[in-house]
Image: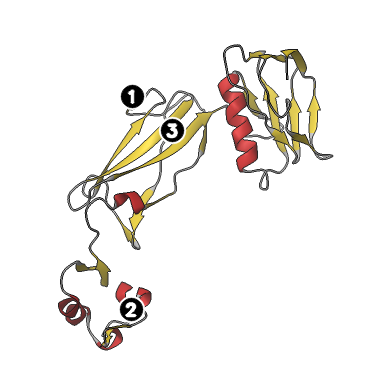
Amino acid sequence: IYNNCYYTFVYFQTQQGLNAVDLSNEELLSNLGDNWEIYNSEVLPIIGPNLINVSEITGLKTFYIYTGTDIPLEYSCNMYEKELTKDIDFDAIIKNENKEIVTSCVEKGNYTLTIKGKGNFNGSKEVPFIVCFEGDGTEENPYLIENAFDWNSYAKFTKSYSDLIENLFVSLKNDVSFENQSFKSPTNSCSVVFNGNGFSISDINQGCEGIFSENSSKGVIKNLWIKNVTF
């Protein structure tokens, strides 16, 4: 007798008078009929076609730090407490921001991981991620911003993880121009030391929240020049 099957846990042991606790997996499967299977000693629903888009992708980060080498992506695709198998249940495709299929993530940029069902699975799911700036955010090895993409990625990073950022160090690597580029305002509302290193950000001519949307008593902004800015 199995008391730990998916059916027992999710469907609260009974359905239409059937007491799952009193049945073995094989007996339960026989009573349930189609669309169920035994997998890893549990009775699980067989996922129908075009439903891989409701899967859960775990382990994939939103931000990866640029290293100049290929970044290994570690993730799993799970559905109904069942981990799907790459190359059997799904194919994984990585595309860069130009929608080109790539086999490695070396360059900075916006990427998309696409999970495409195969075998018994159909449909697809896309998960975006970013490779940006370099460093580890410490005083000895701060995050380095060298272009508009790094800056805007950093802005997104600060707003996504503002509650988690603590004692972070960020520096400009060189002058950064936003000519013909969008501009996003990072927040310095947490304990971040932003060091411009005497470099400038320039050519911002669009409405924004300010160079920094917030700056708290814990945040430090220093050695930064601002040129040719129109709010």
Marks 1 and 2 in Cβ contact (< 8 Å): no
User: Residue 210 vs residue 151: left or right?
Assistant: right
Quadrant housing residue 70: top left
Image quarter of the N terminus? bottom left
Residue at 79 percent of width and 28 percent of height: 221
Specify which label sits upstream in the sequence, 1 or 2. Answer: 2
How busy is the neighbourhood of tag 3: few (under 14 within 10 Å), some, or many (20 plus)? Answer: some
How busy is the neighbourhood of tag 2: few (under 14 within 10 Å), some, or many (20 plus)? Answer: some
User: Residue 57 vs residue 188: left or right?
Assistant: left
User: How far apart, in angstroms, are the residues tagged by discs 3 and 1?
Assistant: 17 Å
Q: Amino acid at mark 2?
A: Thr
User: How far apart, in angstroms, are the residues tagged by discs 1 and 2?
Assistant: 45 Å
Return the residue at label 2: 8
Quadrant housing residue 98: top left
Residue at 51 percent of width and 27 percent of height: 67
Return the residue at label 1: 100
Pair 2/3: label in front: 2
Specify which label sits upstream in the sequence, 3 or 1. Answer: 3
What residue occupies the far right of the structure in this picture? 217
Residue at 44 percent of width and 37 percent of height: 128
Q: Amino acid at mark 3?
A: Ile
Image x and y of residue 80, in percent:
33, 62
Q: Amino acid at mark 1?
A: Glu
Q: Is residue 178 above or below residue 137?
A: above
Return the residue at label 3: 71
Image quarter of the C terminus? top right
Specify which label sits upstream in the sequence, 2 or 3. Answer: 2
Q: Secondary structure at mark 2?
A: helix
User: How far apart, in angstroms, are the residues tagged by discs 2 and 3?
Assistant: 41 Å
Marks 3 and 1 in Cβ contact (< 8 Å): no
